[in-house]
Image: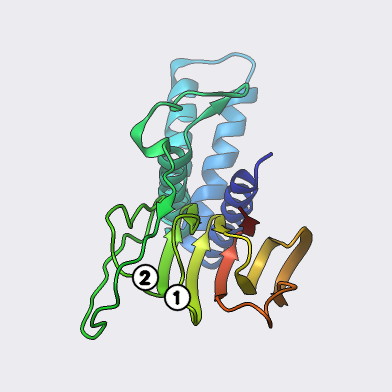
Amino acid sequence: MQSSWRFFIVTELLLFVWAIYQLLGNIPILIFLIFAIINFVYSVKKVHKTSFNHFQKISSLVVMLLCFLSSPAVWLMIVLAILFVGLKGVEVSGIDLFSNAPWRKKQIKMIKTVTSDSKSGRRFKRPWIGNQRFGNDTYEWNDINMSIIYGDTIIDLGNTLLPKEDNVVIVRKGFGKTRILVPTGIGVMLEHSAMIGEAQFENEHYRLKNESIKVFSNEYDEATRKLKIVTNTLLGDIEVIRI
C-alpha cells in the first residue's frame, strides 16, 4: 500500500474516533441512534416480514444516517474522501480509473534563475490543496516558502544554478509526500518534523513519530552552494533525491 493511502486511512480512522466521541457527548442524538439500531436489527431478524417491517428498516437507516451527519467529524471525513479520490484516483484491482485525468498528471517544478533583481515587495499566492506546479517561466531564484493542506509536491532543482550562498526551502504541509531533487555538489541540510512520517536522505531512512530530525550531507561544510530544507507535516514523508 502506498504511503498516501496509509495517510488517508489513518486520517479517516482518527476522524471516525472523533465522530464517535462527539456522538457519545450528544445524549439526544445518541438515544435516537441506539433506538434506530435496535429497530433496524429487529426488522432484519424478524422471520415473517410485512410492509411495515420494510418501512422500519428504511426509516431506521435514514435516522442512523442523520445521526452520523450531525457530527462535524463525519462531514470532514466525507470532504477528505472526495478530495482524496479527486487527487489520487480510484484504484480497483491495481487499475487506476483516472490515470489519464488532468489532475493525476503530477508536474515537476522547474525552477530557473536570472540576474539578481529587487526582492522587496514581492507577493506569492499558491493553492493550499492539490499537487502544485509553479516556476514554468524563467525567473530569479527566490527562497521557497510553501503552506499546503493536502497534496504531493515535487521540486526539481536540476536545471537551476543556485547562488553561492545559503538557499532555503520551507514546506509546511498537513498531509502528503514531498520530493526534492538536488544536483550533486550542493551541500544540503534537512530538518524534518512529522507526527507520523518517514524521511529519506543520503541513502538513509528514518521513521518519525511526533519527532524532528536534522541531518547534513557529507560535503555540507565544504560546499560553496548550500541548500537548507525545512519541512513540517502532520502525516507525510520527505525524500531528498540526488541527481
Circle 2 SS class: loop
Tell me what residue is drawn at x 41 percent, y 37 percent: 105
Residue 14 numbered mark, or none = none
* Residue type beneath disc 1: Pro
Q: Where is residue 42, by image quadrant?
A: top right
Precedes in sequence: disc 1 or disc 2: 2
* 85 left or right of 25 in image: left
Circle 1 SS class: loop
State the separation of the CA atoms marked 1 and 2.
Answer: 8 Å
Q: Do the residues labelled 1 and 2 touch (CB within 8 Å)?
A: yes
* 179 left or right of 109 in image: right
For label 2, the residue is 141
* Residue type beneath disc 2: Trp
* 197 left or right of 159 in image: right
Q: Nearer the viewer, residue 202 or 94?
A: 202
| Residue 205 in view here | yes
Residue 27 lies, with reference to residue 16, above or below; the image says: below
Tell me what residue is drawn at x 49 percent, y 15 percent: 50
Residue 163 numbered mark, or none = 1
User: Residue 110 location, x and y as percent?
Assistant: 40, 53
Dot 1: few (<14), some (14–19), or many (≥20) neighbours within 10 Å?
A: some
Q: Nearer the viewer, residue 66 or 229?
A: 229
Residue 196 lies, with reference to residue 98, above or below; the image says: below
User: Residue 88 location, x and y as percent?
Assistant: 48, 39
